[in-house]
Image: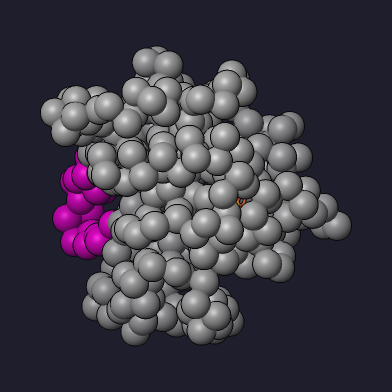
């Protein structure tokens, strides 16, 4: 039989900093918030966010007989000092190291194998921010953190600089207590967002979000956003950088994979415009930056260049 302490111990051995447990239940108000968000069109071009609604509401449609969700968090924070040079584009902290999917999938695989060694009847389906699962909701239900007004999950020990992974399983556990919302009266993230993308507390309109446009948007970046990108070429950390919980509690990751050892935090815009497919592949095939493809990275560089 698997116990909470087994999962916690083995998760820590595989560098997961945060572990929590939630009962597998139908989502209620969280699902309604998601539907309202879609109704506003705040998913912008992310059509995949509209798919698999039944599974998002009921994870038993993902794993039949699901009893629990194990939520995991892995700290990726490295302190970055950006030069402020206008002809350079800034890379979000989460993307300066190795692609987190590659790192976390491997750790999840080993963790699940070890749990199966203890209990061969342990069944698991796991996701790292992909798949038909509301990962932030489950991390809150598992007591990993609360949702900040910028919509990211915040933990009192690590701030919001961590990746989330979830395991849906057929086993029961003692369930974690949910953490209350510690945002209080703070509005620092809302006030700092240069495009006013946080339309109200806890709601981000992707149509205005720099992170969406520089990573997920497959088309042109709207002209009305010119001059508002604060030189972000891939992602945007502004709302998390100003959060008091991050200012006070960020801890540097111990994982070499997420350390920015290649000084990858800025790209010269002119250099980006000259990159060939071969160079792009060799530089970014194991980086989250590959998601935007060379065409997208050049579009971002051009957009920033035109806004100088
Ligand atoms: S990521 Fe940037 S643009 Fe998006 S909500 Fe946060 S501050 Fe605004
Ligand atoms: S900046 Fe303030 S309001 Fe925004 S997430 Fe952090 S604590 Fe909450």
Q: Residue at x 20, y 51 (%)?
A: 116
Q: Residue at x 71, y 68 (%)?
A: 200
Coloured how? one colour
Q: In the drawing, does residue 188 fall left or right of residue 215?
A: right
Q: For residue 73: magenta?
A: no
Determine if residue 307 is in view: yes
Q: Closest to the observer: 26 or 136?
A: 136
Residue 209: horizontal and vertical position, in percent?
55, 56
Res 273 → quadrant: top left
Q: Closest to the observer: 100 or 61?
A: 100
Quadrant the N terminus occupies: bottom left
Q: Residue at x 57, y 21 (%)?
A: 85
Residue 135: horizontal and vertical position, in percent?
43, 61
Q: In the drawing, does residue 138 fall left or right of residue 168?
A: right
User: Residues in magenta?
Assistant: 107-126
Q: Is residue 60 above or below residue 262?
A: below
Q: Is residue 169 above or below residue 227?
A: below
């Amino acid at each position: 039989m698997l116990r909470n302490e087994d999962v916690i111990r083995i998760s820590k051995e595989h560098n997961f900093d945060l572990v929590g447990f939630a009962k597998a239940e139908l989502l209620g108000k969280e699902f309604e918030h998601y539907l309202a968000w879609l109704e506003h069109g705040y998913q912008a071009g992310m059509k995949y966010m509209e798919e698999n609604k039944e599974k998002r509401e009921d994870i038993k449609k993902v794993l039949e007989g699901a009893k629990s969700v194990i939520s995991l968090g892995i700290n990726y924070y490295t302190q970055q000092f950006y030069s402020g040079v206008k002809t350079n584009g800034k890379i979000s902290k989460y993307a300066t190291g190795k692609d987190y999917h590659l790192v976390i999938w491997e750790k999840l695989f080993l963790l699940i194998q070890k749990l199966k060694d203890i209990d061969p009847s342990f069944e698991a389906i796991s996701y790292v921010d992909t798949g038909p699962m509301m990962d932030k909701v489950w991390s809150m239900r598992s007591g990993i953190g609360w949702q900040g007004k910028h919509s990211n999950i915040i933990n009192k020990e690590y701030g919001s600089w961590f990746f989330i992974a979830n395991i849906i399983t057929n086993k029961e556990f003692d369930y974690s207590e949910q953490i209350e919302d510690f945002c209080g009266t703070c509005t620092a993230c809302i006030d700092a967002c240069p495009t006013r993308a946080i339309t109200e507390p806890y709601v981000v309109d992707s149509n205005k979000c720099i992170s969406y446009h520089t990573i997920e948007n497959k088309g042109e970046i709207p002209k009305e956003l010119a001059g508002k990108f604060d030189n972000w070429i891939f992602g945007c950390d502004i709302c998390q950088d100003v959060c008091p919980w991050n200012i006070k509690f960020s801890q540097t990751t111990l994982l070499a994979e997420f350390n920015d050892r290649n000084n990858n935090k800025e790209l010269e815009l002119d250099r980006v415009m000259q990159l060939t497919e071969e160079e792009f592949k060799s530089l970014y095939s194991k980086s989250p930056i590959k998601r935007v493809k060379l065409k997208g990275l050049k579009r971002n560089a051009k957009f920033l260049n035109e806004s100088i």
